[in-house]
Amino acid sequence: MKVKLFDCEDETDLEESVNEFLSTINDVVDIKYQVSVSVFSEEQIFCFSAMIVYY
């Protein structure tokens, strides 16, 4: 079993990266998705991440 981690600042970038990776493998066990946000000064910083567990 293996894992692949993705971390992007934009949800569309994460979607593209995950879809590209999924097209190269056959046996997905699980996908975990997470969004976190923080505030720096007056700017909101988003982090979109995913972990794919596969064979």
Image: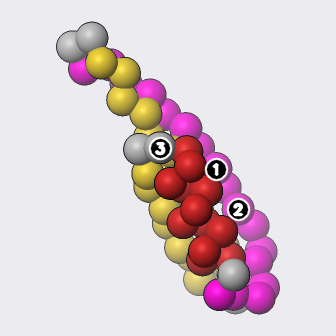
Q: Residues within 10 Å of mark 2 (few under 14, many from 20)?
A: some
User: Residue type at mark 3?
Assistant: Asp
The span from disc 3 to disc 1 (Cα, nearest Å) is 13 Å
x and y, in percent, of residue 29 in the image: 77, 74
The span from disc 3 to disc 2 (Cα, nearest Å) is 18 Å
| Residue at point 49%, 62% (across, down) | 6
Query: Which mark is in front, 3 or 1?
Result: 3
Main SS type for the magenta part?
A: strand
Q: Which residue is mark 1?
A: 33
Q: Are marks 2 and 1 in contact (CB under 8 Å)?
A: yes
Instruction: Please determine whether, in this image, residue 42 is positioned above or below residue 18.
Output: above
Instruction: Please determine whether, in this image, residue 1 is positioned above or below residue 14.
Output: below
Find numbered disc 2 in the image and state the secondary structure of the residue it sits on: strand
User: Which of pointers 3 and 1 lies earlier in the amino acid sequence?
Assistant: 3
Q: Which residue is mark 2?
A: 31
- Which residue occupies the foreground of this view, 14 or 31? 14
User: Residue type at mark 1?
Assistant: Tyr
User: Residue type at mark 2?
Assistant: Ile
- Which residue occupies the foreground of this view, 20 or 49? 20
Q: Are marks 3 and 2 in contact (CB under 8 Å)?
A: no
Specify start and end residues of the magenta stretch as a single range.
24-40
Instruction: Please determine whether, in this image, residue 21 is positioned above or below residue 16.
Output: below
| Residue at point 54%, 55% (across, down) | 14
Residue 41 image label: none
Instruction: Please determine whether, in this image, residue 15 is positioned above or below residue 54.
Output: above
Quadrant of residue 38 within the rendered picture: top left
